[in-house]
Structure formats: structure tokens, C-alpha cells
Image (tube, rainbow, N blue to C red):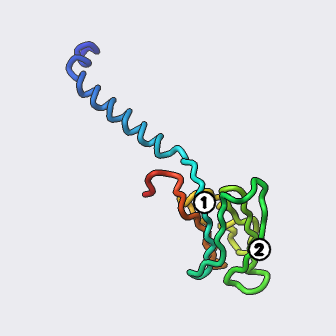
Amino acid sequence: MKAKAFFAKYFWDIIVVGSLSLASSAAAIYLAIPKNSSDHIAQIVRDSTTIETLDLSKESANERTFIIQGAVSGEAGQMVIGVKTNAIHIVSSKCPNQYCVHTGWISDATRPIVCAYNHISITIVGSTGADVVV
């Protein structure tokens, strides 16, 4: 089958498939673009109890740090938390695997920071950064 005959036979199929591909790509790009939001409230929770609530939109652009105590008593349970405008992370922790430290900065509700060793979780409420969270 020659190219001209192929395109003549499947013209509308190509138009429909191309239109659907373009529409789905546009929707995916729109959902992937981060949205600016001023309601960045970080909750630090230990054993289902909120121990700290921070309004990250009111923080300065320079990082400030503070220490919280995890479930493990003594110096082994101390964690250093860093905050700046609309973002939070764990600077250091004495936990064995350091997964919480390697999570890095978070700035929306799509990804929490969890330290299972110290029973600490840090989430941002009120800002998903996207229109849809699956």
C-alpha cells in the first residue's frame, strides 16, 4: 500500500488518535506544573500527636534550624529541622538509615518526611502543589 493510499484510507483515524494524544499530553503538562500557594503549613507529628506547627510562608529566605526530640530518649532521639520560605527538611538525625535526612526539602503535600526510628513525620497541609493527587 502506497503512502497516499494509506493516508487516504486512515485519515480520520490519524486525526482522532493525534487529537487524543495532544489533549492528554496537554493535560499531563498542566497537572505537572507546580502551583503557587501561600498556605504552606508544616505539621511535625510524633506518635500521632502534633508537636509543632509552622507557617512556612512566613519564614525567611534564609534557613533557620531548631531541634526536636523524637521517640528515642536522649541525644539519639534529637533531630535538627531546617526551615525556610515554603520549605522544610531534616538537617541531621541520629537514626541508623538516615532516610529522613536523604528525603531533602519538601514544599508541598505530595511528599512527607518520615523518620520511623524517632516516630516523626513532617507533612505540609493545605498545599498539594497539583490539582489532582492520586
Residue 27 drawn above or below residue 117: above
Residue closer to the observer: 53 or 122:
53
Question: From what the image shows, is residue 99 above or below residue 131?
Answer: below
User: Image quadrant of residue 71?
Assistant: bottom right
Up-down relation of residue 18 to residue 122 (above or below): above
Mark 1 → mark 2, Cα distance in angstroms = 20 Å
Residue 32 visible, this orientation: yes
Q: Is residue 105 left or right of residue 132?
A: right
Mark 1 is on which residue type?
A: His
Q: From the image, which quarter does the C terminus lie in?
A: bottom left
Classify 55 as above or below 47. Answer: above
How many labels sit on residues?
Answer: 2
Relative image position of residue 28 (x, y in whole percent): 44, 42
x 61%, y 78%: residue: 50
Direction bottom: furthest residue: 73
| Amino acid of disc 2 | Ile
In-image side of 134 versus 91 (left or right) = left
In the picture, measured across the screen, residue 68 lies left or right of residue 44, that is: right
Which label sits on residue 123? Answer: none
Q: Does the residue at mark 1 contact the one at mark 2 (Cβ under 8 Å)?
A: no
Seen as rendered, the residue at the extreme left is 9
Please give the residue where the numbered disc 2 appears in the rendered image. Answer: 67
Q: Residue at x 62, y 56 (%)?
A: 107
Q: Which residue is mark 1?
A: 40
Q: Position of residue 4 (x, y in %)?
A: 26, 13
Residue 29, image x and y in percent? 47, 40
Q: Nearer the viewer, mark 1 or mark 2?
A: 1
